Amino acid sequence: MKRIAFFLSNRSCPHRCIYCDQRAITGEMHIPSPLEVAGILQKFNQPVELCFFGGSFTCFKLEDQRCYLDTIKNAPQGSTVRFSTHPLCINEEVLDLLNYYPISMIELGVSSLNNEVLAFCGRGYDNQKVIQAMRMVISRGFALGAQLMIGLPFQNEESSLEDVDKISEISGEHITTLRIYPCLVLRNTYLEELYKKGLYRPLGIEEAADWSGKTLYRALNKGLKVQRIGLQETESLSASVIAGPHHPALGEMAKSHSLAITLTSKIKQGPWQIARNQISLIKGHNCYGLRVLSLMAGLAEEQTLQRIEFV
């Protein structure tokens, strides 16, 4: 199903996080009205997934939410709605409203479940609040998405992997979908001030690939889905990044790291059979996957290659 995304940049966000500038990330300055959305949806002749990203959708006034949700009536039959929102704005009244619409997924901006990280980043809630929000979404039968971040101030790999474990525990038999985003230093944010004062050190690209690869491996082995790793590239984002693991292939590198963990956990030093469609995970991006696999196996890169059969 074709996905049609509309960015309601920073609209109704109850707090300004230290790392966030949605307009810089999406490049969208104009917030489309429900009338504009409806007009665009009328042009399609096949079902679409209507997406509202960049703002905190359920923090809108209920009537405003209803106006945006009603635009789905202008799309072909079978179309659905997905949106991102803030955990503070999930409640029974909101979920009652959403129950009347074909909601394909509610994506919560979780960021972290570590209270020290949440407090420093200005998220405005503790981990119990976001856990409650996730449980409410699941209990009402909606598909849940959780947007996690890596490399935040006071965050480490251990706490990040614990977040994955906790989300898996909350989800139970329900399949939750994750997005994993690296923390970038953007212009005109408080994090930029901290970075320039030497009070925050962002991850390097390979650090972020290692961390997100471990997160990906843990998530998949816990029965979670991972929809995306890394922010979608835009001209505005490129122009706004001061520092941090900004790389268009971060997701591919994370998959390389996850594959290396999978291979060495089964046979420490090979031999390994790898599908031909995964060759890029070994040889791409300056042979990042090969280097990681060699390190995990305790082998020289040449030895590692000799123990791989592409099938």
Image (cartoon, helix red, strand yellow):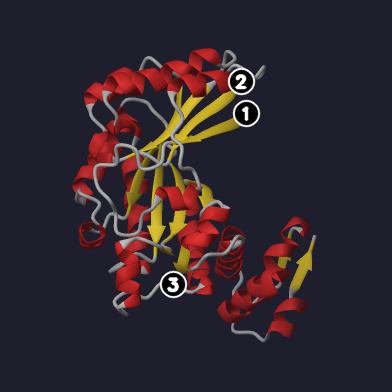
- Mark 3 to mark 1 CA distance (whole Å): 35 Å
At which x and y percent is residue 41?
A: 57, 21
Q: Residues within 10 Å of mark 3 (few under 14, many from 20)?
A: many
| Secondary structure beneath label 2 | loop
Query: Residue at position x 20%, y 49% from top?
Result: 124
Q: Is residue 297 left or right of residue 286?
A: left
Q: Which residue is mark 1?
A: 1
| Secondary structure beneath label 3 | loop
The foreground one among 165 and 146 is 146
At which x and y percent is residue 208?
A: 48, 68
Q: Is residue 10 left or right of residue 212?
A: left
Q: Amino acid at mark 1?
A: Met
Query: Residue at position x 35%, y 18% from top?
Result: 66
Q: Which residue is mark 2?
A: 47
Dots 1 and 2: beta carbons under 8 Å?
A: yes
Q: Amino acid at mark 2?
A: Pro
Task: Say which mark, if any, is on residue 203.
Answer: 3
Name which quarter of the figure residue 58 lies in.
top left
Position above or below: 92 against 118: above
Quarter of the image with the C terminus in it: bottom right
At which x and y percent is residue 49?
A: 55, 27
Extreme residue toward the front, this view: 30
At which x and y percent is residue 210?
A: 50, 69
The mark tally for this picture is 3
Quarter of the image with the N terminus in it: top right
